Image: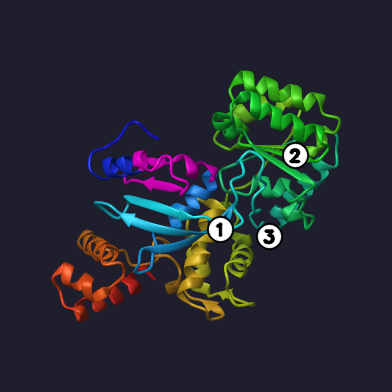
Amino acid sequence: MNAQLQPGADHLIYEFLRRSGLRDEPVIGFTSHGTVMQNSAARRFSSDDLLTIQLASRHVDSRGRARAETSLGVVELRVEQHLGQENRLIRIGLPVDAGGGTPASSPGQPIPLAGSSPSWRTLVDTVRRAQAGIRPLLLVGEAGVGKASLAAGEALNESRVGTALGVIDAQALVTLGPARWFEQAGALVRSGKRVIVTRIDALESRQLGGLRSLVRAADFPHRIALTIAAGQSEAAAFIGFMLDAHAVKVPALRTRGADLAELWASFALRVGAAPGATLSTSALTALRHHTWPGNLPELRAAAIHAVSQKHQACVQRADLPSYLPGRPQQGLMERAEQDAIRRALLVAEGNRSRAAELLGISRATLYRKIRASAQIEG
């Protein structure tokens, strides 16, 4: 947990997480200062999962509940807000089949990588040729662009997720310890499976040396793929040289406007949209004007939101999340009022009559304000 804590909401979230540190229930705290805190049970979630959970937690029902599709499956979120809309404490209900496996060796659920634009087809062909060669593959790109899914064959219509693929996360070295992590990585490399080592920018120089030894000793180095963050361009060039890897850059979602409609349809079907669901012209324009800092997980969260708003075949601009371009935004007073309503509903456990009493307004007024908020947040 981050030790640089701010007073108020940060302190409340920190105290709860400190007390719940030994619980089996994953708990995550997000604050307006950008601090992310989690108990030990929540460390099984990847950084992409955390972004998906954070985005989904902005759109709760009257009971403070939401759902998020993570690498462990669809999880149930119970969201509490403290002293402002951006300060959230989230309890996570894991799916029944999530198990307690280590994050180091679980392949999880691949991100759909739909796309038929010429630039995307060229990238897919480049990856296919690289994996048919004799060198390991190094995929470079921002978090959430689908590097591991691309390495797993998800975009090649030949997904290897399952017994033919092993995935190990370099960030898990912190929790597993170097000895156990390298033991697991070595076993995967020697197994002859396709192996993906994710987020290798988390490794220190000595640990990178150990990884180089594993790769060089592998009988089939072309079956090894590695991923690294795009922000580490110099590190990526150095690691590519050190490992004698074929480096391929995976584009950010904001540069894939030609593939957005196809990607949207892929996500929408996975989260329950009717077959044949489409985007209106205004909705597609809004998607193309957004910068997508969260890349594919953020698009998935937007699809979940839109599907929960409407079950008709054509998604309109009003069905998309309010933070996308072109939607009316709430002012400071409106946001404060909605924060108060959400807190009252949480305290009243979803009972709107009781929430109205706590707020000192009539039930009819509460219903009117909830409807008004729903129209803005769409």
- Residue at 58% across, 22% down: 204
**Where is the C terminus found, in terms of image quarters?**
bottom left
- In this rendering, would 93 be left or right of 232? left
Give the spatial CA distance, label 1 vs label 2: 26 Å
Q: Which residues are magenta?
A: 17-45
Give the spatial CA distance, label 3 vs label 2: 24 Å
Q: Which amino acid, by three-letter code, is at mark 3?
A: Gly
Q: Earlier in the sequence, mark 1 or mark 3?
A: 1
As rendered, which of 146 and 236 lies closer to the eye?
146
Q: Is residue 31 magenta?
A: yes
The image shows residue 223, relative to residue 303, as above or below, that is: above
Dot 2, how many residues are within 10 Å of its Cα: few (below 14), some (14-19), or many (20+)? many
What's the coloring here? rainbow
Q: Earlier in the sequence, mark 3 or mark 2?
A: 3
Q: Dot 2 corresponds to which residue?
A: 195
- In this rendering, would 133 be left or right of 279? right
> Residue lying furthest left in this view?
360
The image shows residue 242, relative to residue 11, as above or below, that is: above
Q: Which amino acid, by three-letter code, is at mark 1?
A: Pro
- Residue at 40% across, 66% down: 326
Q: Which amino acid, by three-letter code, is at mark 2?
A: Val
Q: Badges 1 and 3: C-beta atoms under 8 Å apart?
A: no
Which image quarter: residue 127?
top right
Q: Dot 1 corresponds to which residue?
A: 95
- Residue at 30% across, 77% down: 371
Q: Secondary structure at mark 1?
A: loop
Q: Dot 3 corresponds to which residue?
A: 115
